[in-house]
Image (cartoon, helix red, strand yellow):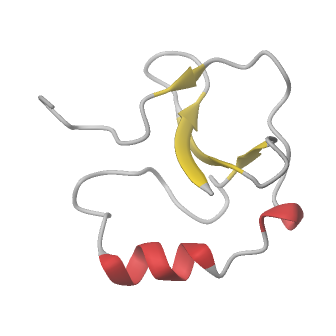
Amino acid sequence: MKLLRHGPVGAEKPGALDGQGQVRDLSLLIADFTPDWMSPEKLNALKAIDLSKMPLVPAGTRLGTPVTGVRQF
């Protein structure tokens, strides 16, 4: 699983790339991936989600940075 955000700039939603290379929408479970949200416990809980049950993001949808609010790398 690879975390990502998808959608128009400024209106991105959290998502993940599944094992088959399909982008899945996680916005029903998570408001957004923020630095405050990231913790080992939450990431482990996310690993337990069956991504195949999450909605597919339409092909061609813009993909963005995985975490919002990060000022510099």
Horizontal side, residue 8 vs residue 56: left or right: left
Identified at 31% across, 64% down, the residue is 38
Which image quarter is the C terminus in?
A: top left
Identified at 43% across, 40% down, the residue is 66
48 or 14, nearer to the observer: 48
* Residue 31 higher or lower than 49, as above or below: above
Count of labels in the image: 0
Instruction: State which quadrant residue 8 falls in.
Output: top right
- Residue 26: percent from the left, percent from the top? 65, 55
Horizontal side, residue 9 vs residue 34: left or right: right
Identified at 62% across, 47% down, the residue is 15
The extreme left residue here reads 72
- Residue 20: percent from the left, percent from the top? 85, 49
Identified at 40% across, 51% down, the residue is 33
- Residue 1: percent from the left, percent from the top? 63, 57
Horizontal side, residue 65 vs residue 53: left or right: left
- Residue 36: percent from the left, percent from the top? 22, 61
Instruction: State which quadrant residue 65 falls in.
Output: top left
